[in-house]
Amino acid sequence: MGLFDRIRRVVSANLNDMVSKAEDPEKMLEQAILEMQEDLVQLRQGVAQAIAAQKRTEKQYNDAQNEINKWQRNAQLALQKGDENLARQALERKKTFTDSGNALKASLDQQTTQVETLKRNLIQLESKISEAKTKKEMLKARITAAKAQEQLQGMVRGMNTSSAMAAFERMEEKVLMQEARAQSAAELAGADLETQFAKLEAGSDIDDELAALKQQILSPGTPTNQPQLPAETSGQPSTSKPDEVVDAELESLRKQLDQM
C-alpha cells in the first residue's frame, strides 16, 4: 500500500467519523422527510405533464379519426357523383390521416402506460411519506426516551450513593441512641417513683406499729398481740420489773439502732 493510499484512507476514516458524530437522528429524519416531499412535488409535476401530453395526443388522435371519417365520406360522395378522380384524392387524404392516426395511437398507448406507471409511483411515494412520518414520530419518541434515560443514568453515576447511605446510617444510629436514652430516663423515673412509694408504705407500716405500741403502753391490761407473762409458782401476785431493768433494756435498744 502506498503512502498516498494510506493518507487517503486515514482522511476518509476521520471524515466519516466526524460526519457520524455530527449526525443528529432527529434532524436527519426531518431532512429525509423534506427530501421525500420534494421528490413527491417533482413526481406530481411529472405526472401532471405526462397527463397533459396524453390528453394532447388523445385529442390529436381523435382529430385524425374525424378526418379519416370525413375523407371516407367524401370519397363515397365523389363516387356517387361519378367523379372517380376526386374520390381517389379523397382516399389519398384519408390514408394520410390514417397513417398519422396510427402513429398517434401508438404514442397514445405508450403515454397511457407511462401515466399509469407514474400514478402508481406517486401513490407509493405518498404512502411511503405517510409511513415515514409515522415512523419519524415513533423514532423521535424513542430518541427522547433514550436521552432522558441517558441523562438519568448520568445523574445516578454522579451521585455519591455510598456517602448518602452512610449519612442515613449515621442518622439512624443517632435516632436509636436518642430513643435508648429516652427509654432509660423513663425507666429511671419509674424506678424512683416505685422507691418513693415503697418508702411511703414502709413509713406507714412503722407509724402504724408505733401507734399500736403507744396504745398498748397507755392502755391498761395486757395487749392482745403480745404473749402473756408466765405466772409465778409460789402463788404470790406478780410484780413489774424494776425501773432500772427497763432503762437498761431501752439503752440496749438504742445502741442496736445506732449500730444499724
Image (cartoon, helix red, strand yellow):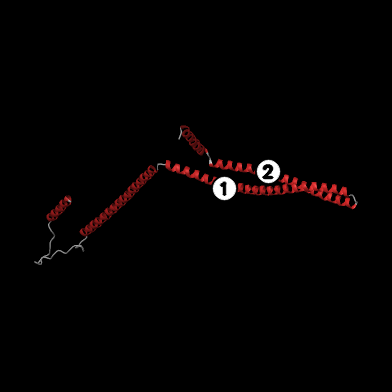
201 up-or-down from 47: above or below: below
- Nearer-the-camera pick, 150 or 193: 150
Residue 63 in sight from this viewpoint? no
**Total label count?**
2
Residue 125 is labelled as none
- The quarter of the displayed image where residue 230 is located: bottom left
Left or right: 197, with 94 as reference point: left
- Residue in the image at 72% along x and 48% along y: 106
Q: Position of residue 91 (x, y in %)?
A: 83, 49
- Nearer-the-camera pick, 186 or 47: 47
Task: Report the residue marked by disc 2.
Answer: 46
Residue 43 in sight from this viewpoint? yes
| Contact between labelled residues 1 and 2, with CB atoms less than 8 Å apart | no
Task: Report the residue marked by disc 1.
Answer: 135
Residue reaching furthest to the left: 234
Q: Position of residue 101 (x, y in %)?
A: 77, 48
- The quarter of the displayed image where residue 28 is located: top right
- Nearer-the-camera pick, 249 or 221: 249
Q: Position of residue 129 (x, y in %)?
A: 61, 46
Q: Judge depth for marks 2 and 1 and give the one in front.
A: 2
What amino acid type is highlighted by mark number 2?
Answer: Gly
Q: Position of residue 19 (x, y in %)?
A: 52, 37
Indicate the secondary structure of the residue bearing disc 1.
Answer: helix
What amino acid type is highlighted by mark number 1?
Answer: Lys
Residue reaching furthest to the front: 85
- Nearer-the-camera pick, 3 or 103: 103
Indicate the secondary structure of the residue bearing disc 2.
Answer: helix
Left or right: 133, with 192 as reference point: right
Q: Earlier in the sequence, mark 2 or mark 1?
A: 2
- Residue in the image at 66% along x and 48% along y: 117
213 up-or-down from 19: above or below: below
The N terminus: image quadrant: top left
